[in-house]
Amino acid sequence: MAPEMNSMDFKVGELLKEIQLNPLATKAIDRAVSSITDAINNIPNQDVVSKYASGFVRDLLVPSDKSNFKFKSPKSIRIGGSYSIRCVAKPDVNVDLLIRMPKECFHEKDYLNHRYHAKRCLYLCVIEKTLKSSPLVRKIEWKPFQNEARKPVLHLYTVVKDADLSEIIIRIIPTATSLFTASRLSITRNNVRSPTQGDTSRATPYYNSSILEDMFMEENTDFVKNTFNEWKILEDALLLLKVWARNRSSIYTHDCLNGYLISIILSYLATGPGGNQINKSMNVMQIFRVTLKFICSSSSEADGLVLPIFVEKSHYLKAFPIVLYDVTGHTNLLFYMTRTAFTELQDEASWTVNCFEKCRGGGFEEVFMTKVDLAAKFDTCLRINLKGNVKVNASDICSDDGRWRSIEKDVQSVLQQGLSDRAKLVRVIWRSAPFNWNIKEGYGNFGEEPLLVGLLLNSQEKCFRVVDIGPHTENNDEATKYREFWGEKAELRRFKDGTIAESIVWECSSWQRHLIIERITKYVLSNHFLVSQEDIVCVVDQLDFCLHLGGKDPISSSTRLLEAFETLSKRLRLLKDIPLRISSVQPLDPGMFPHTAVFPPEPHPLVYKKGITKKISKLATTCIEPLTVMIQLEGSGNWPLDAKVIASTKAAFLLKICESLQDHWGMHTSAAENEFNVLMDGYAFSLKILHERSLNLLRKDGNDYIKGKRYVDEELFFRSQHSSMINGLHGRYPAYGSAVRLAKRWVSSHLFSSFLEEEATELIVAYLFLRPFPFHAPLTRITGFLRFLRLLSNYDWAFSPLIVDINEDFTSQDEWEIHENFMASRKLSEENVQNLKPAMFLASTYDKKSEAWTKISPNDEILRRMAAYAQSSADLLTKLILQGQNGPYTWECLFRTPMNNYDAVVLLHREKLSYPHHLLFPSTISHGRPVIHGSASKDFQSFIEQHDACLHLKTKERRLLNFRLHTSYEITKKSLNVIHDLIISMLFLITYNKIVMLKNVQHENYLDEIYNFRDLLCLPAEAGAHFVSLIILFDARSTPEQCTISFSILEKPLRTYRSTQKLRSSA
């Protein structure tokens, strides 16, 4: 633990150095602030009329004669906020200038009916008019203070004259010290008596707190400044807490946490009212932990966050869900915080404390460096367009809480009631102000941005259940409310136990259950807010297109595959006419686990036992992919010790097993060298025998045969261990399978599947579920996929092993052993600079040396490229979730790999591909020059037409087992490096140096040295004769060394190219 803590302290120290302002930057800011202060102090006295902010004053329903006043210079201008206590955290450099408005500008009753807010805005208008001409100010914007529309502030964007600062924003914040008597703004009084509010006796605690906040802002600033004075460690703790909160965008927002509030909490904990929980003997991380634990343990329903303790708090707790008194005891600093926001804040604080205890390395990366935004944190996100909504427009702008905050709370309440226990948290955030707010237009453009909702779902069983049971018929009042809320959707049902209750049924197929959340949210929002279906976007199924075939998820038919395997397994165990009985049968192929296979195998009409013919109405594929099944025999001491003899013995056993299956059950089998296939019930199974004794055979120097055979047994062993663990993982995390399928589809679409094994992808996704910190384990596919992309792009692969503790039973000794193995592999890589060594170290329970899936690849170059692609895809996916499709950037772009990085593209005839229906979408190439054109083969057809039963035998002869185009040719190590798409086997990438050599397995013809870049294009043309449709050459480099060619199987282009000359003449 000590080394981890030392590492944590070092990392924290480096982080603090990076985010703190340097002395030169501080001097630049001081000069800018001094100039702005002088400019404001020199504003002459003048008459102010409502036309300066006509729309704002109009929308607040303040008469013109009540808003006019005579402007006078501020009583004082002082620096507040983080800059005043040296706690600005880059890159957000904000300086708060507190402008104390003089009492002479206000009437004693201006606290009524938004008069104060109108004059406050007009006072800022005069300041804005003056500062527009300042050479230090580049731009001025109006922004709502804490998203409160009735309290705008000015954001001044200064001219930066320091290289360390990208942007300096000076916020002009008016204060109202001593303007009004605090008792008149008691939270039990009503001070908004507009005509639209009939009940004038109703208290306005939010409106009153809005003014009280300005009245006592300077006193609270002094309290914080005095506490932080000459306490460097406390300043560092505040910086760390700001970094922590800023990374969590859903809590660092207008209705939850901000830097000012964090400084208040720290000041409270460091003084008498807070029990002196923080003292000067603590280091920065101790203060950080104490603050988080205080937030976790605070109760919003009992005492809340209370400062100071002697203030009467009962009436505050009735008016606000969360309470934090200011230093004067007159106002609640958390009047804007909702109960949901506080619940989320406590959850984040608690989960962060948990990170310190459970994360390796002390949790620095998870706590301070990982971005926990809305898109990645929540299981489901909604965007609701309320622009022009009838209910929103009907609500009162001048209400106690304001129109937009009231709608936020209403949406949260409706969604929480509709989802009930399906959702642990419903988080609603609406940044209603426009980006470029013209104060003269008032609130005309408010509410144009969509309202964002994040849903943190409960367990899979709860959130995707089909039936919701409501109140029983005996409870009339509750049943009436239930029917009023659900409308025509509610119905009475009798259940198996005899009870009769109100209920809601969301009928759907099993593969559509993830859409239930979308159906519920759209229904309740449409009913209660009159929002059209088109204005509600629920991010749940936008990526389903890449997993569907014919508009349906093929996983729905996986039951037949499992039944076929169970039948085969039973029959194998029942065999008695083989020398050794079969003790275990285990599926190994990813296709045998439908939850992790991109396209689970579909039953083929020509793969049934003798005498059975399955009629088909559609075309059947010619190619059949066999599924690997591993069998183990009972123990025996008569096994040979020679590797060659062991291999022959295994082959003899498999032949005997195939014969027995044919004799006993009439099953069709196919045997060839190293291939023993059993065809039954629409599927082909490839049988393999694992003999554990061969794993312990010593490798003999120079005996490649033994090495190869041992590798086969090692692979079987690794695959058996892996499949068992992954199958169990899916049982614990039902969303794991769909997240893996999306991850594999992405890896394949970008041509990385030949470098990254499917099992490696499964382990990386497994890590997200087993070690989800700083998140909770995802419950939806899109969230899991986004986190996969971010992990792939952000993980420190060069200096850290990825430890996947599937059983969660690794000891410190196990982790030490893994780190030693990792360091040994990195040392070996440094010593062999000439050789490209694997760059990804995946350690698991069964493979602590990372030998199973990443022993050969990906290398460092490919991993960097993969990380760059993942980063780009993650950024795009985040924008799609939060902002929707914008122009050419659509959901499909996540799976389109760029072609501009390569030198040539080879297009095959789509109708000749092995599995053309697995193509995601046709690609188009708008540039390049065609150099080769090929005609389609008539010998190979992707599909077989079976019009009647008499053609059954003929079509059976045309089926191809385990046929893929990329396996038809062998590339020698010193020649071409073939990269292909494993999902559809139709995307090829070839890198080459000066000399290349291609060996055709069938004809054994060798090509001599090739130097010309275009001559190289002969290779795919000859190798893919009658399959290649077109080869397009892009602008090639002048020197062909280390060039890259992409052989991309795309749909045949619609336009027809003219015939080209022979390759030699065109080159």
Image: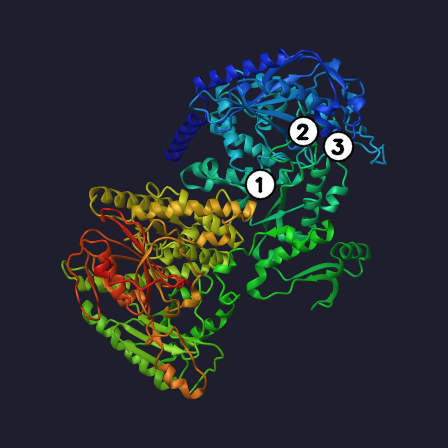
Write down the residue under mark 2. Answer: 439
**Can residue 678 be seen from the camera position used here?**
yes
The residue tagged 1 is 347
Dot 2 or dot 1, earlier in sequence: 1
Q: Amino acid at mark 1?
A: Asp
Q: Are marks 3 and 2 in contact (CB under 8 Å)?
A: no
Mark 1 crowd level (few <14, some 14–19, many ≥20, 10 Å Cα): some
The residue at the point 74 percent across, 46 percent down is 390
> Is 618 drawn above or below residue 469 in the view shown?
below
User: Within the image, what quadrant is residue 75 found in?
Assistant: top right
The vertical placement of 995 against 637, above or below, is above
- Circles 3 and 1, Cβ within 8 Å, touching? The answer is no
Q: Which percent across, then down, holds residue 645?
A: 19, 71
Left or right of 746, for residue 184? right
Helix, strand, or loop for circle 2?
Answer: helix
* Label 2: how many Cα within 10 Å (few below 14, some 14–19, many 20+): many
Question: Disc 2 to disc 1, how far (Cα)?
Answer: 38 Å
The percent position of residue 401, horizontal first and vertical second, equals: 73, 35
Q: Is residue 127 left or right of residue 15?
A: right
Q: Position of residue 892 (x, y in %)?
A: 48, 54
Q: CA distance from mark 3 to mark 1?
A: 38 Å
Mark seen at residue 59? 3
Would residue 329 be visible to someone looking at this image?
no
| Amino acid, disc 2 | Ile
Ranked by sequence position, the earlier of labels 3 and 1 is 3
Disc assigned to residue 990:
none
Q: CA distance from mark 3 to mark 2?
A: 11 Å
Percent coordinates x, y for residue 431 in the rendering? 63, 38
Q: Few, some or many C-alpha atoms within 10 Å of disc 3 (few <14, some 14-19, many ≥20)?
A: some
